[in-house]
Image: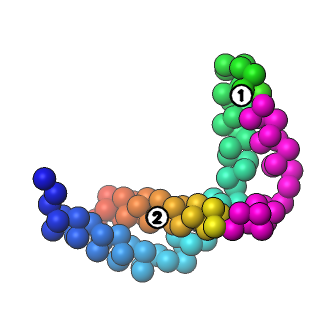
Amino acid sequence: MCDWEEIKKTLNHLGEVFVSNWWNILSYSFILLLSLPIIKWFILSTFYMIFKTPSLLEKFGESTAFSLLPWWIDFLIEPVKTLEIYILLIILMTCIFALLNNNNT
């Protein structure tokens, strides 16, 4: 079963971590958002070097073509999707900061 007190305690801790490190979390998340096309290209190229399937070659070609475009083109085409990814990155960075903060105390 769910222990609601533990969930509430965890969410409160995440909120405290975000409030105390909001500038670092937002800036690192934005840098990661800008880096996502390069990270995707690197992962697809590594998979293609290992497996060499036609579908991976197609995805790698698409990724290479779209990596040449500026990052804000994707924001103009699909702003809601980009905003959702940014919010997920903020949550991820908050969890990472909470884990790092938890290990220090």
- Residue placed farthest to the bottom in the image? 19
Q: Mark 1 points at which residue?
A: 56
- Residue 100 among those drawn in magenta: no
Q: Nearer the viewer, mark 2 or mark 1?
A: 1
Which residue corresponds to the image point at 57% horizontal and 64% vertical from the top-left?
84
Q: Mark 2 points at which residue?
A: 91
- Choose the circle earlier in sequence order: 2 or 1: 1
Residue 26: image location, x then y, percent: 56, 72
Say above or below: 99 vs 45: below
Q: Identify which residue, 45 or 28, lies in the foreground.
A: 45
Q: What residue type is labelled 2?
A: Ile
Q: Is residue 31 visible?
A: no
Q: Distance between the residues labelled 2 and 1?
A: 30 Å
Q: Which amino acid does label 1 sit on?
A: Leu
Say above or below: 53 vs 5: above
Q: Please, what secondary structure does the residue beneath circle 1 have?
A: helix
Residue 3: image location, x then y, percent: 14, 60
**Mark 2 Cα shell of 10 Å, populated few (<14), some (14-19), many (≥20):** some
Q: Is residue 80 left or right of residue 12?
A: right
Residues drawn in magenta: 58-79
> Which picture quadrant has residue 16?
bottom left
Q: Is residue 8 visible?
A: yes
Colour logic: rainbow
Q: Quadrant of the C terminus?
A: bottom left
Which residue corresponds to the image point at 29% horizontal and 74% vertical from the top-left?
12
> Which picture quadrant has residue 10?
bottom left
Say above or below: 70 vs 21: above
Q: In this view, does 48 lie to the left or right of 65?
A: left
Which residue corresponds to the image point at 55% horizontal and 78% vertical from the top-left?
23
Residue 48: image location, x then y, percent: 71, 25
